[in-house]
Amino acid sequence: MTVTELPAPPTPAAELPPPPGVHLSAPETRAVLTVQDGILRATREYLSEEGFTELLPPIIGPVTDPGGRGSKQVDIDFYGHRYKLMTSAILYKQASLLAFPKIFYIAPNVRLEPLESSSTSRHLAEFHQIDVEMAGAGRDEITAVVEGLVRHAVGRVVERHGRELAALGRDPEVFAALLAKPFDRMTHQDAVASLHGIDHDQNPDAEIDWEGEALISRRADRPFFVTQYPKGSRGFYDREDPAAPGTLRNFDLLAPEGYGEVCSGSEREFDYARLVARIRESGENPAKYGWYLDMARAGIPSSSGFGIGVQRLTRYICGLDKVWQATAYPKLPGVVSP
Ligand code: AMP
Ligand code: MG
């Protein structure tokens, strides 16, 4: 398999969603949104059964996830103070564990992704995450929750939404391996080596790029985890592995058939001094994170958590070309839309 086998990038015109009146009344959109409703219902069923409490997520705050993944944050004027729209509610998830040991949100995020990402078929400027955090959990426990949740959601969709899948031309047989077999895992280092083996120029210090994810995930028959990303490729809150410094106790879940990343997660850093050091290393001023660091100094639980992109998961389950097809009100990077 070589990079040249990748399909040509879509033309900009093919990327653009139709106007809302056309998009919302299309039978295909109705089938996709019905499946998405089924995914969200199954998510709540599963997490509630596992003892998680659903909280309503914050939308604004004095700081948000610093990201470092190339997207820009959106400022708002909060009574003369500069606040941010949430790019991710990660800091609040850690805070929430002071109230309950297992929590989740269905959280909206706004990220001004780079213009070129409007043609990846995977990026929206506004999307949602199934955002989960669990006190005291290590990576193996939290990946078990991801796996259980994805299997439950897909199982429920296959059970309850055969008609919608048929209307979308999605054969439920593609989920046979996902439903029957445990998800595999590979390290980031192995993923990089395997991409170098097929002449894909993957940067070993960065997250796997989109083309690389498409290449490795195309070979899989079910979702799989990539673990242990290098420090610097992810946020300061992903815990560094004491046994393998320079790498993080984190993971992504990649969907097969070339769909790639649907979830990122990690064991979290929770120690005040290490958090300050990691914020500094990432080139940021710890003073910006005042409320969060004050809370960490007083003590927050160790935890692990993850975020699954709702539209990305819907795209995979429905077998859609573009992620915008999995949202009622698509906002593509740089595209002016209602
Ligand atoms: P991240 O914190 O960047 O790993 O994002 C968590 C999850 O949200 C990812 O695994 C994706 O499933 C989803 N996600 C991130 N960015 C976008 C985006 N621009 N558009 C749609 N989904 C996204
Ligand atoms: Mg990610």
Image: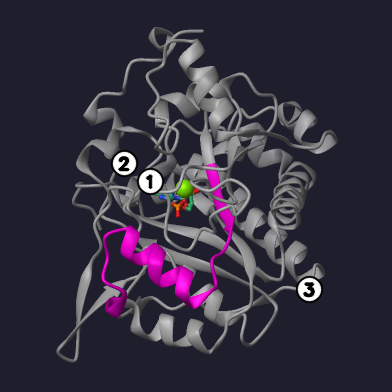
Residue 23: mark in rendering: 1
Colour approach in the figure: one colour
189 or 98, nearer to the observer: 189
How far is the residue under mark 2 from the one under mark 1?
A: 7 Å
Which residue is label 3 attached to? Answer: 51
Residue 131 seen from this side: yes
Indicate whether residue 117 is drawn in magenta.
no
251 or 103, nearer to the observer: 251
173 or 21, nearer to the observer: 173
Asked if the residue at label 1 sits under 8 Å from ligand 1, the reply is no
Q: Residue at x 33, y 15 (%)?
A: 8
Which residue is label 2 attached to? Answer: 17
Q: Residue at x 56, y 32 (%)?
A: 319
Magenta residues span 262-288
- The image position of residue 32, as x and y in percent, is 55, 45
Query: Considering only order in the chain, which callout, 3 or 2, is on the residue closer to the N terminus?
Result: 2
- The image position of residue 223, as x and y in percent, is 66, 35
Q: Quadrant of residue 134?
A: bottom right
- The quarter of the image holding the C terminus is bottom left
How far is the residue under mark 1 from the one under mark 3?
A: 37 Å
Q: Quadrant of residue 279?
A: bottom left
Q: Classify mark 1: residues with Cα within 10 Å, few (<14), some (14-19) or many (20+).
A: some
Say if mark 2 contacts mark 1, CB within 8 Å: yes
